[in-house]
Structures are given as C-alpha cells and as structure tokens.
Image (cartoon, rainbow, N blue to C red):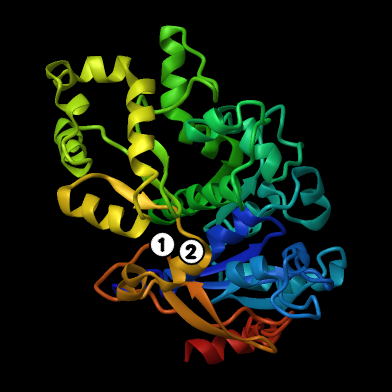
Amino acid sequence: MSTDKPLAGITVVERADGVAAAYAGRLLAAMGAEVVMVEPPSGTALRREPPFLDGEDRWSALFSYLSVGKKSVVIDLEDTGERAGFAALLDRADVLLLDTPVDARPALGLDAESVRRAHPRLVYGSVLPFGAVGPKAGWSGDEINLIHASGEGFLLPNGLSADLFPDRPPLKIAGRFAEIQGGVTALLAVLSALWAGGGEVDLSVQDANVAIGAFAIQRLGDGSVEHRHQRSFRYGGVIECADGFVELLTLEERQWTALVELMGRPAWALAPEMSDPAVRSARGPDLNARIRAWARGEAVADLVARAQRLGVPMAPYNTPADVLADPHEAARNLFADVRIDGVGPVPVLTAPFRFGPDPLPVAAPPPVLGADQDLLDMTRPEGRRRVTA
C-alpha cells in the first residue's frame, strides 16, 4: 500500500450538490481514490456558488477547492436512456456518495434499495442535512440552518466577542464550518464501511456537528444550559494586542506558571492565593481584565514567539494572506499551486492530513464539465476487457 495514496484502486462515484458530500469526495480523492463526479447537463450547483476566481463566473472558488483531483462526467438521470451509463459506472465502483434529497431518489433510481439490489458490494454513502431516516429526513438545510440546529450557534459569540458586543445576535461561523464537519464525518463513515466490506452509510450533518458541542451537552447532566454570554474560559480566550488578536488557553498548572513568566511576573499574579486554580477560576473576570490590559501593549508576532518558547499555548489570528505567507505552512508544504484553466496558478490546501513525510500531491486541477466523458465508454463490456488486459 502506498503511504501517500492509500486508497489507490478505489473508485468513488459522487453525485453531490452540497458541500458535505463533495468534501468527503475531495478527501477520498486526496487519499488516492478515483472520484468521478456525475453531473447533470447544467453541472453541479456548486459550480455556481460565488465568489468566482475569474471574471466570467466560470470557476467558483468553492467548487474549485472541492473538486481538485476529481473527474467529471455528464449523465442526465432524469433521462432513463442515460441510466445505463450510470449503472455501468457503479458496476466498477466501490462507493456511491450522494446528497440527493430522499424523496427525489426513487424517480432517479438512486434509492438505497434499488442501488444495493443492483450493486450489492457497493458502499452506499448518503450525506444529508438531517439524515435519510427519521422525522427530519425530508428537510433541506443550508450552512446557517445546520450551525444553529446543532447548537453551536447558540454559543456564539462568546468570550471577548460577547464582552465587546453583548447585544449582537447569534453568529454563523465564517465559511462552511458545519458542512465541512459533516464531510469529515462522512469520510470516516465511508472508510469504515469500506473496511467492513460494504454497507449503507446514513450521515446527518446535524448529528456530526452536535458532537462538536459535546462539553455543552455534558453540562446538561448537572442542570446547566450553556449560553454564549456564560460560555467562556475563566480567563484567556481571545486577547487583543497592539496590532491584532491572539488566542490564549491555559488548562494546566505549568501553562499558568509560564504565562506569569511571559507577563514579566507581575505582583498580582505572584500573590499566594493565585497558586490555587480554584481561586483563579473564581476570579476569572478580574484576571482577564489584567491580562487584556497587559496584552494591549504587545505586538502579536513577538508575543507569540515568546509564548511558544515558554510553553504558553498561544497562537495568532491570521488573515488568509498571513496563512499563505507563514513560514510554518511553507515548511510543511501545506499548499500547492494548482493551475486552473483561464485563471492561472492558485494556492490550494493539499489535504488536512498526510501518511508519510511528504504532503499529499494534488492529482489534477478542477475539471471542466464533462471533461472525462470517455469514462462512460470504458464502462462498456469491451472497454472493461481492455482495461483489465
């Protein structure tokens, strides 16, 4: 087995209009699987998601990221005459990954019973906002619905943000946090089914995100219902500096001791009672006021460097440009330039994991619609014989 492509030889057929299923496919492709997007004649809806990398609305930034390393064929499943090509693709596939709404699946031949009957060894991976079974199976849901349905939105903003803007309404985390989390969970479920030799996966993006709030759920046992105005670290969290923001987290005694050293051993922090974690926790607001007052005179880069040398868990809040220019990311080769037709080279995160010393390569740029239509010819009996030989 190749350490950089452990899923080499695995074929995934993906029919996705949403981020969660498409991201699961993206990660499978990064691991070496051949991922074939089956798109309608108009293309997946993700191709039309702004913002766009070019001035012609041709290359959606979101679609481009989610589809690197994949292939594209066009099959109109509403045309029964074209379904033979789809069935032939599934004949040689190991996984079907889809987010087609449950009530639309039977008419397209995509319901689990029909697919499993015709392709019994196939892993059937369903990725939906609220799952394929249960009272909410027919519900649609976008990112903002999912982040709040999972409870995370109830807890945001908190900490410094809630202190500075107490009247702000609940927030959606930037980007597609909930859907990406759903995609990661779908990936793990599909891998489990592959290792088990097949089966059906029913992934609820809501359920995947409820797991993120596990600590808040645990608090229900003692009668506590966390809310964004009460939920925060007793001290630490988001700290404003002279030229930006950092995140500070001190969970262990040695980390508190190192923080005291970082602050220059102020008298208030050296008071005997401050050696008791329970006292520090009870005085959290006062400690935060003192830490914030001290940090406002510090520059982010210098402060973070000193904190890391002392073992204080602290990191800067970076802009996208900061991330691309960061020496750590450069040393780890986390980004690769992908040449997109009509756009040029674009830095793209290769994968959030690796299996050896080197980063996973990006196999191919995002495909134009129907770029791999010849794959349908390969699925014909004579085509399969040629490939086998």
Between residues 382 and 198, which one lies in front from this camera angle? 198
The correct choice, above or below, for 39 with respect to 380 in the image is: above
Q: Quadrant of residue 50?
A: bottom right
Which residue sits at x=39%, y=71%? 334
Q: Is residue 17 left or right of residue 202?
A: right
Between residues 370 and 51, which one lies in front from this camera angle? 51
Q: Is residue 324 left or right of residue 203?
A: left
Kindly indicate whether the residue at mark 1 contacts the one at mark 2 (C-beta within 8 angstroms): yes
Looking at the image, which residue sits at the far top?
Answer: 223
Which residue sits at x=63%, y=64%? 14
Which residue sits at x=84%, y=71%? 42
Q: Which mark is residue 153?
A: none
x then y, percent, for residue 224: 47, 11
Query: Callout 2, which amino acid?
Result: Leu
* Distance between mark 2 and mark 1 Cα atoms: 9 Å
In which quadrant is the N terminus drawn?
bottom left
Which element is circle 2 on?
helix
How many other residues sit within 10 Å of disc 1, few (<14), some (14-19) or many (≥20)? few
Query: Callout 1, which amino acid?
Result: Pro
Between residues 301 and 200, which one lies in front from this camera angle? 301
Task: Return the disc, 2 or 1, that comes first in the chain's sequence.
Answer: 2
x then y, percent, for residue 37: 65, 70
Q: Residue 94: tell me if it is visible.
A: no
The correct choice, above or below, for 288 with respect to 249 in the image is: above
Q: Which mark lies nearer to you, 2 or 1?
A: 1
Residue marked by disc 2 = 27
Q: Is residue 221 left or right of residue 274?
A: right
Residue marked by disc 1 = 352
Which element is circle 1 on?
loop
Which residue sits at x=20%, y=44%? 262
x then y, percent, for residue 107: 84, 53
